[in-house]
Image (spheres, helix red, strand yellow):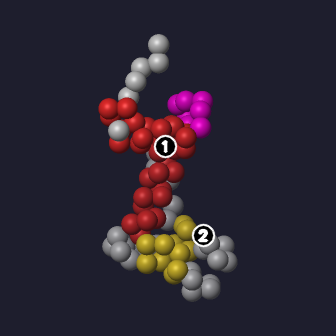
Amino acid sequence: MLNRSRRVDCPQCSGSNFWKGDPKPTDELHCRYCKAFVTTYDNYIHDRIRNEAAQTLARFIEADSEQDLMMLREVLAHPRRRHVNR
């Protein structure tokens, strides 16, 4: 179900980079080509989860999943603002 690829493209040179072993959340990934900072493992995992959630929502509904996630976060953050459209 989840995309288990650990490939991360460098934002500077677009080179392919990979996490090796069992990284800690604070471990940093640096590009093997240009040596630029790419991301931390914690940020990488959060981005992967967010992308997988958006793709899963998109499979079940015909809407803009990013917009739906934003709306859901807003509703959950402010429960008193909820209203029912009738």
Query: Alpha-carbon neighbours of circle 2 within 10 Å: few (<14), some, or many (≥20)?
Result: few
Residue 17 percent coordinates (x, y): 56, 74
Q: Give the residues in magenta.
A: 58-64
Residue at the spot of label 1:
70
- The residue at the point 40 percent across, 36 percent down is 75
Visible residue check, residue 16: no
Q: Residue at x 46, y 64 (%)?
A: 44
Decide which of 70, 78 is in the foreground and name it: 78
Q: Nearer the viewer, residue 53 or 71?
A: 71
Residue 72 location (% of width, % of height): 43, 38
- Label 2 element class: strand
Q: Secondary structure at mark 1?
A: helix
Of the residues shown, which amino acid type is indicated by label 1?
A: Met
| Residue 79 visible within the image | yes
Q: Is residue 13 magenta?
A: no
Q: Which mark is residue 9?
A: 2
Q: Position of residue 22 (x, y in %)?
A: 35, 72
